[in-house]
Image: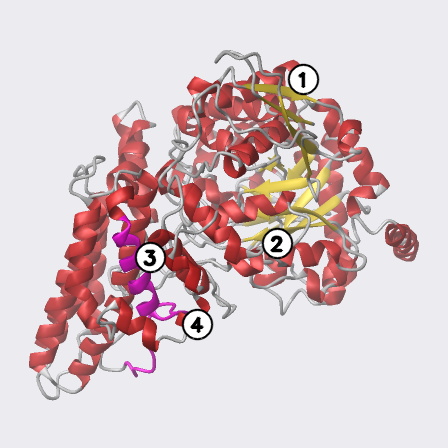
Amino acid sequence: MANFRARAFTILWLLFLIFPNSDSHPNLDSLHLSLHALRPSPATQISAAEGVLSRILPNHTSSFDLRIISQEECDGKACFIISNAEVKGDTTSHEIQVSGSSGVEILSGLHWYLKYWCGGHISWRKTGGMQLGSVPKPGELPRVDPSGVKVHRVVPWSYYQNVVTVSYSSVWWDWKRWKEEIDWMALQGINLPLAFTGQEAIWQKVFKRFNLTDADLGEFFGGPAFLAWARMGNLHGWGGPLTQEWLDSQLDLQREILSYMHQLGMTPVLPAFSGNVPSSLKRIFPSANISQLGNWNTVSGDERWCCTYLLDPNDELFVEIGKMFIEQQIEEFGDITHIYNCDTFNENEPPTSDPSYIASLGTAVYKAMQAGDHQAVWLMQGWLFSSDSSFWQPPQMQALLHAVPLGKLIILDLFADVKPIWKNSNNFYGVPFIWCMLHNFGGNIEMYGILDTIASEPVEARITPNSSMVGMGMCMEGIEQNPVVYELMAEMAFQSEKIAVEEWIKMYSSRRYGGPNVRAIRAWQRLHKTIYNCQDKIANHNTDIIVKFPDLNASEIVITSVPGHQWYSNEDAIVALDDLLQASKSLENLPTYRYDVADLTRQVLAKISNHLYNKILSAYQNADDKTLKKESSVLLELVADLDNLLASNECFLLGTWLESAKALAVSDELRAKNEWNARTQITMWFDNTEKLPSQLHDYANKYWSGLIRDYYLPRMALYFDLLEDSLTPNVSFPFVEWRKRWISLTNTWQTSTNQYSTTAIGDTIWIANSLLQKYRKMSDVKTQSDYIQNSSFAASIPEETTKEPSV
């Protein structure tokens, strides 16, 4: 049987080679047809698109004529067409017609027009929001070429989200915020979004049919801020139990989310059964093949949280549960998709590396999906191939990938922006894949990107011989940061050729600020070549000492390098900030500009803090009490200044996170639980003892005002006090005492209920200017002109940027 399966796959793979674009494979052709049949009527999609238009440009609802067209009019692919409408000479008539093969395509075309004809810009509200002041008033919209503009998708799918994004970013969202996000998705061309909200209520209904109780499930589900890892089988019970109120409200929210996605013509990706089961299932089915997994990051293997249970996919109960789960979702939400996500081996190895066993697991997982939906397609995150590459060698990879019929499994090359798997696996051995940008870990806040890679590598992957690429994806762990990165990545789904980022970044700056500004453009050119050109292949998980203070014994530290991730010269960032601030006279009232100034100033101060920390440790090791006191005082003052800066911008407030968590509760019990979950995730994350911190402490660190003032700053001050107290000869740093005090500080803060502001206080531009002047002396940069004369980067700044550019 195994040999027959191998021969059959070989035949299918050879057929695939004849049609090297995976979206031409018969199984995928069938998928596209079946998904197209699930879409709502053109009138419904147009109405949903018109709703988005009315929210972003309420005065222009009559200016645009939105239409659905057939894929035949798009040459058999997905596309949008922008054309001039017949002008009747009044402000109520249509001026521009935007046609698309779905509601998403219509809105992609609208966004394209607003960007490239009106100089508009759309980003998350927490990164400055929209800049649409440059859009001419009704009756004066720019005309396009008389023949119109047709833009095709270069790949069928634009995928969005990571299985943990729902915990790091959207866990506390209400329907209003979700609707805003789905609007953003559609405008960015997202047509394949992950939709994981509310699945615990589905599991409750399924598992109760197997005689599990509410108490059993209370120990199984994670708390609101930790649901992602409970779903993956990394932990259980932590932050819980969930209340029935939470379960019901999240299910209602999911109904609204899926309904709206469907109206726009999106294909939501729903969850499937991975084998993760409550421990009590073994009591009810003693003969079932249920194994206990190992410890995932708990301090001491506390079984209240760790060592979850996995039902073997080859057990007949696996298909029964998997089938019931898919069917329950269809009953709740309707027939809206055939694509399901399942990650059985996410940071959990199979019990054996035997390829035949791994193939049997893959076959069984897909069989459970297909039992519930005979047209099911398995979408799998490819993170396991990167995070556990020593296990997933070619024989193991091929065994898993080829266990599912070709075209019925799609792989997310999750970290393709830094560590692409497709290059070393012959395009995933012919299995369709989506080129993904991971970019962010833990929802951390740090300016970072690899724009040149994003602008070229997806094209390389798509045009490489025998490519099996079928989509592009954004799989960040947390959103609402680095809007420049996400705008470029979303756009690549509609770009057939590589983008010249040097020119694109000029246009981006002009769109973001409502018009070309010499200083702003020069700042963004420098940022492109430095902060947004990281090529060191290191996963950018923020380790700046302010937000992830090193848990190290000062008596044993060997100073070898500056802490944190430093892939560029901070001098470049200082000069870019200086340029950006020089543009404040004309831009200071723009939220996009104020956000960028706050973010770049934060970035500059964070990197300075890392150098100051090294000076402090060096002074300690040299028993230099005077320098230790001086530099500690400077660093603590810098951190306090940073909190004041971030307090001046509503995008960097702890209060927003905490108040959103509390707002989802209608009972005091749930309100307290939500706040503890929200505070714990961004600090210690997981369990600790009196003397041992969580292994995941600061994983989800944030540069938020309030969190810096009341948690990061006191923690740092505590460490420096202990440094000074132990500067006596023959006295070692009290490392155990440091940990006990830090953990006590954390536990107290996590259980506190003091309120934090959701309103900004202060003038971001004035504060940023003051801090630049105050701290730039800590760098070798004296003046911009001195720097440019001596900088190796100066040669890369075109002379014409000193004049008004043509954008």
Mark 4: few/some/many CA within 10 Å (<14, 14-19, 20+): few
SS label for mark 2: loop
SS label for mark 4: helix
* Residue 10 included in the magenta stretch of the image: no
> Are dots 2 and 4 in contact, CB under 8 Å?
no
User: Looking at this view, is 303 or 550 the one in front?
Assistant: 550
Instruction: Provide the residue span drawn in magenta.
Output: 557-583
Tell me if 678 is positioned left or right of 8 in this view. left
Q: How is the image coloured?
A: secondary structure
Sooner in the amino-acid sequence: mark 1 or mark 4:
1
Residue 185 is situated, as x and y percent measured from the top left of the image, at 53, 35
Q: Which mark is residue 795?
A: 4
SS label for mark 1: helix
Q: Which kind of residue does numbered mark 1 sit on?
A: Pro
* Viewer can see residue 357: no
Residue at 18 percent of width and 78 percent of height: 733
- Location of mark 1 (residue): 42
Sooner in the amino-acid sequence: mark 4 or mark 3:
3
Residue 748 is situated, as x and y percent measured from the top left of the image, at 19, 49
Q: Which kind of residue does numbered mark 3 sit on?
A: Asp
Q: Which kind of residue does numbered mark 2 sit on?
A: Phe
- Location of mark 2 (residue): 345
Q: Which mark is residue 329?
A: none
- Location of mark 3 (residue): 698
Sooner in the amino-acid sequence: mark 2 or mark 4:
2
